[in-house]
Structure formats: structure tokens, C-alpha cells
Amino acid sequence: MSFFGKIKDALKKTKESVSTKLRQLFLKNKLGDAFYDELEEILISSDVGVTTAEDVVEQVKEEAIGNKIKDEQYVSDLLKDILEDTLNEAPVPELQYPCVMMFVGVNGVGKTTTIGKVANWFVRQKKTVTVAAADTFRAAAIDQLNVWADRAKVKIVKHEEGSDPSAVVFDAVSSAKARKTDVLLIDTAGRLHVKENLMKELEKMDRVVQREYPEAAFYKLLVLDATTGQNAVNQARVFDEAVELDGIVLTKLDGTAKGGFVFSLCGELKIPVVFAGVGEKIDDLERFDAEQFVEGFF
């Protein structure tokens, strides 16, 4: 199945919710202040942030009034165009090689599983991959990443439980450089974004990569659970302040009826979504595409 098919299927709950509300809105309201107020409420109820929802609706209103448009299909298409433009305010970066990707996030978002899927994605692109088990706080995390590395048929660098995560990163970088590996993926321990000492540990790993492997493109990606809605935006803001995020990986997109927070990530924080997880299988992850996301949204 293509990414369009996968994301369309994954966003089914969101689409059903938003499309139903929009149909009802067009049936009961002509284009006027009440219409635009309710349109804003529909977007907010789908977890589009208040600031982003206000901005999007204002753009729709200005263009529709300026062109004296009252056609339902035109307004619907206009809304799609503006939402797509909002996503494109944070364009998905072109990947360069060799590259290092460090995955960060809170507990329970599926970082380790996501790294396995991303490793598999790069293997499908004919790239060589190494994964680094820098979540040394849980033996289970190292074991889990080992399983995913085996599935994706990629090399893993790991130390014992309780080891210094930055030492794992150092060894993984050394290995990737020696082997001329295309992609190094670094797993990190899940952390509460309010724990200062854990955030400083991320900053230390960040420095190791930049010092030891300056010739590699370095991407810091936050893994977000799509079912957490607007709280995901708060997480992104804090992690961005700590390590200057280059992008987002969405997990569990198929489990939410409120995917609208993605527009706030791109529109307000200017952080692009790089990958989207749309299922549980190893192949259920693809590069994010703004146009296809909007088509799946409503």
C-alpha cells in the first residue's frame, strides 16, 4: 500500500469526525461570522491549536470575502490549501549522508520500536545502518532494540545496562565512521521533559556527536505519540529548547481521531514532521507528506 493509502487509512477516525462536522456546518450556516466561528471550533476540537486555528480561519475568511465566494466546495478546497501551506511552513528536510539521527522523547511513545522501523526504512532505500542502544537505564530497552536490529538486519552497538549513554554514542560514532555507514540511529532513554538532569544528558550526547562526527548530517528527532494531542506540542516546545529539534516522528497516527496538533507543530513551532508511523508492522512507517496528510485529514 502506498503512503497515501496508509495515511488515509490511519487518519480514518480524524477524517470521519472532521468531515461530519464540516458537512453539518455547511448545511446550517451560510458564510458569515457564525460560520467562521464554528469552523474555528471544529479545528480546535480536532486538536489544532487555538493560535493556528484562528490564523487558518482568518486566512480562509479574508480570501472568501475578498473574492465574494460562497461556494461550499471552493471554501473546502481553500481550507485544504491553507492547511497544507501551514504544514509547509516547516518543510521536511532533505536527508544527506552520512547522517546521524538521535531520537528523543518521553516514556511510552514508542522510541525503540520507531527506531527499528526507521532502520528498516533506510534499508529499503539501500542504505547501510547502525543503531546505538544509548537507553542504558533499562535492560529491556537494549534487548528490545536488539530484536528490532535483527528484524531490520542492521548492526547494533550496545553496552551493559547502567553504562554511560554518551560512551555508547562515542563507540557507535567510531564504528559508523570506520565502516563508512550511511546512517547511525541513536536510541535514548525516555524522560520526563521536566527533568533537568535527564535533559542535560541529552545535551551531552548531542555534543559527543557534533565533536566526534562533524562531517555527518545530524538530525535530532522527537518521537511523539499522536494520541496525546495538544500535549505533544508542549513536549516539542521543551525538547526543542533543550536540543534544537530538526524534526518529529509521529507514532500511533492510526489510533487518534484528533490529528490536528500536527498543524500547530509546523505552523507555530516550525518543526517539520519527518516520518509518520501508521501501524504496528515494521513496514508501517513512511516519509511525511503535507499534501497527503491534509487529504487524509478531511
Image (cartoon, rainbow, N blue to C red):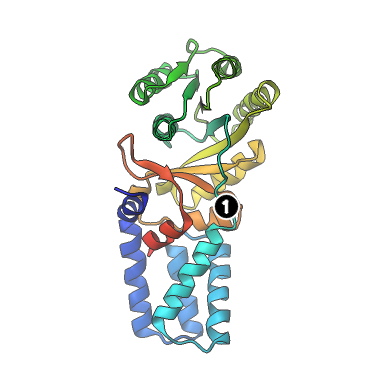
**Badge 1: residue crowd in 10 Å (few <14, some 14–19, many ≥20):** some
Quadrant position of residue 71: bottom left
Q: Is residue 89 left or right of residue 262?
A: right
Q: Quadrant of the C terminus?
A: bottom left
- Give the residue pinned by disc 1: 91
Q: Give percent across and percent down for residue 110.
A: 41, 34
Q: Give percent across and percent down for residue 167.
A: 60, 14
Q: Give percent across and percent down for residue 18.
A: 37, 66
Q: Residue at x 50, y 48 (%)?
A: 231
Q: Residue furthest bottom?
A: 68
Q: Residue at x 36, y 52 (%)?
A: 7
Quadrant position of residue 88: bottom right
Q: Give percent across and percent down for residue 201.
A: 62, 25
Please give the count of numbered marks on the rendered protein: 1
Is 146 placed above or below 11 here? above
Q: Residue at x 46, y 66 (%)?
A: 43
Q: Residue furthest front?
A: 126
Is 267 placed above or below 198 here? below
- Helix, strand or loop status at disc 1: loop
Q: Residue furthest top?
A: 160
The three-letter amino acid code for the residue at tag 1 is Pro
Q: Is residue 73 left or right of residue 244?
A: left
Is 149 placed above or below 8 here? above
Quadrant position of residue 93: top right
